[in-house]
Amino acid sequence: MSEQTSKQTSEQNTTNLEELYNQSIKRVRDGQLIKGKIIAIKSKEVLVDVGFKSEGVLPIVEFKPDELEIGRDLDFLVESVEDDKGMIVLSHTRAKQIQAWNKIVTACKEGNLIDGMIMRSVKGGFLVNIDSIEGFLPRSLSGFRDAAGKDIIGKKIKFKITKLNQFRRSAVVSRREAMQQEKQKARLVLWENLKVGEIVSGTVKAITDFGAFIDLGGIDGLLHITDMSWAHLSHPSEVVAVGNKLEVMVLNIDKERNKIALGLKQRFPDPWSEVLNKYPPSSKVTGKVVNVVPYGIFVELEKGIEGLVHISEVSWAKKIDNLSSIFAIGDIVETIVLFADQQNRKISLSIKQLEQNPWLEAQDKYLKGSKVLGKVRGITDYGVFVELDNNIEGLIHISDLSWTKRINHPQDVLKKGQKVEVVVLSCDAQNQRISLGLKQVIPNPWSEIAQRYPIGKELEVEVASITDFGVFVKLEENLDGLVFKDEIEPQLLTQLNPGDKMKVKVIKVDVEQAKIGLSARIGDGSR
């Protein structure tokens, strides 16, 4: 290929690349609104990509805090395609102003209402902010009746655009006409006909923590949570849902404040009016569990009347940590009434009071040192709960499970549901506590163990486990000894694994603490 041909080919390739590059760049012009993506956020500047050959750099003050997000798409105005530095000049603030103005123009032409915020009082009226566009609300069009400034300044209100100033880009607005437009139809239909005490139909429009707003056909009324049900409610959603059709009673009408109070429970008799006669103390009642909470269970005795069985009133003897493991919503339970408080709408119930207190005879029945049979009911990190007669439970502490076996967790010794023979170590009927022992069923073997393992005796043993403070070794079935960390060469310690054999000698036997101390330093003259 000739030198001239090569040069022409190179120039053609360069031209093609330039064309592809130019085609990939958006065509923009001064004064154009364009979409851009935030690609970097600095302390004072924001970098924006609009698909042009250069990015725009804008002051961070042009953005609201919730707009500052990498990858966020926003609108911008192209103020200049290229400045002295060859950069595109953008403005987010002016873009929002242009969009706000276009929105106002459209609202004026179509007669739509628009949101605005009253900023301050001026001569003859108020200044209004409508998406950063200044509006003037004449006092004659405000609709305020001697309202104090603090009551209206900063409030967001709907307005109707009555006049535009294209040159100054400002507007004259009317709150009075907006109110008339919104409520005229509803007032004609409802306000004249609505009466306190009548039943009206409505649709649940919105739900809050304190109640629900009901659309009565153009006017909203409030159904407060306390007027929804005679029963206790935690949240309005327990009774109503958005979209529900309801028949409610009109409780109060405030035409001046445009407020209507509604009631649902008022359509039905108050069940608490006869509660003292129907549920006297000591009466037995059956109900359905409707809620299970950490401190007790709520039992529905009839529609609108619930009583509480506190966790302390469930059992005389059993230790209960989790009521959900015993009760479920929908369970039918028999209880006894402790007291009823009609004024505060509370009924206290008990399950355990249906039975005689078994702890009254426990002191005489479970004597210290006596052997008893029981069934394992619960296992914790610190011990085992054993059910004795009459549902009384006693605790075997982990230290009282074995004389010789090193126990990591009580479930390594006993299983839930297992029947065991135990010894009563103590019985405190007043505080409802029984301490039990499993190891005490057999004599303490440590006197004999001390004779079998005198100080200085040398043994070959098997490594059971390795800890930070030493090595546990197996002396015999269910009997371990501890080789202290400072009684073994560091090099040997790093090489040991469970199951390895090693030689040790007895250096300590503690009968009271049930421990045997060992040393791996044999024949080194240190002892």
Image (cartoon, rainbow, N blue to C red):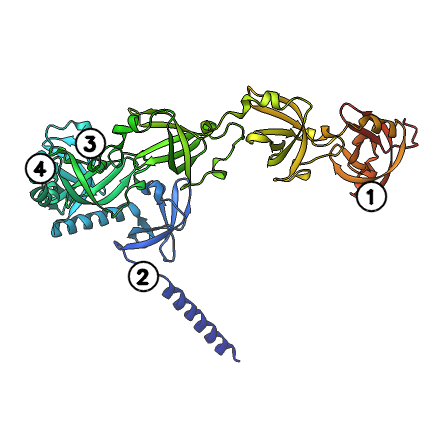
The residue carrying mark 1 is 500
Mark closest to the chain's N terminus, 3 or 1: 3
Eye-nearest disc, 4 or 1: 1
Residue 32 horizontal/vertical position (percent): 26, 55
The residue carrying mark 3 is 153
Eye-nearest disc, 3 or 1: 1
Q: In this view, does 422 lie above or below 193?
A: above
Mark closest to the chain's N terminus, 4 or 1: 4
User: Marks 4/1: CA distance?
Assistant: 96 Å
Query: Is residue 422 shown left or right of residue 93?
Result: right
Eye-nearest disc, 2 or 1: 1
Dot 4: what SS? helix
Q: Residues within 10 Å of mark 1 (few under 14, many from 20)?
A: few
The residue carrying mark 2 is 27
User: Marks 2/1: CA distance?
Assistant: 80 Å
The residue carrying mark 4 is 141
Amino acid type, label 4: Leu
Q: Residues within 10 Å of mark 4 (few under 14, many from 20)?
A: some
**Name of the residue lying farthest toward the top:** 430
